[in-house]
Amino acid sequence: MFNVLEATVRPLVLNSKVLEVAYELYLSAPQSAYPAINLRELSHRTGAGLLECRNAVVEANRHGRFPQCSLET
């Protein structure tokens, strides 16, 4: 039971870190129609993989965060 709980909570903690840094990158991006979040920089700054970073930002976008942003590598 503990393993299931740990497996559920652990990604949430990491995603929180990924989303915080992604938000910083989003705010620092040049203002255009679609501010870009660089996945390589996000991955480098958080220690998460590119796919994990991409998935966290896409999922947050589905919930209304990072409106009209683009992702680049």
Image (cartoon, helix red, strand yellow):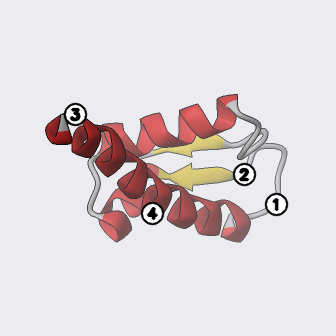
Nearer the observer: mark 2 or 3; the answer is: 3
N-terminal-most mark, 1 or 4: 4
Image location of residue 11, percent across then percent down: 34, 46
Residue located beneath label 2 in the image: 35
Q: Which residue is mark 4?
A: 17
Whichever of callouts 4 and 2 sits on the residue coming sooner in the sequence is 4
Pointer 1: what residue?
Answer: 31
Q: Residue furthest top?
A: 62
Residue 4 in the image: x percent, y percent?
Answer: 22, 34
Q: Earlier in the sequence, mark 4 or mark 3?
A: 3
Looking at marks 1 and 3 on the same chain, the residue that comes earlier in the sequence is marked by: 3
Residue 43 lies, with reference to residue 70, above or below; the image says below
Look at discs 1 and 4 and give the one toward the viewer: 4
Query: Residue 2's image quarter?
Result: top left
Which circle's residue, 2 or 3, is located before the other in the chain? 3
Q: Residue at x 62, y 69 (%)?
A: 24
Residue drawn 63% across the image and 50% down it = 36
Could you tell me how far apart the alpha carbons at marks 1 and 4 are, in whole angstroms? 23 Å
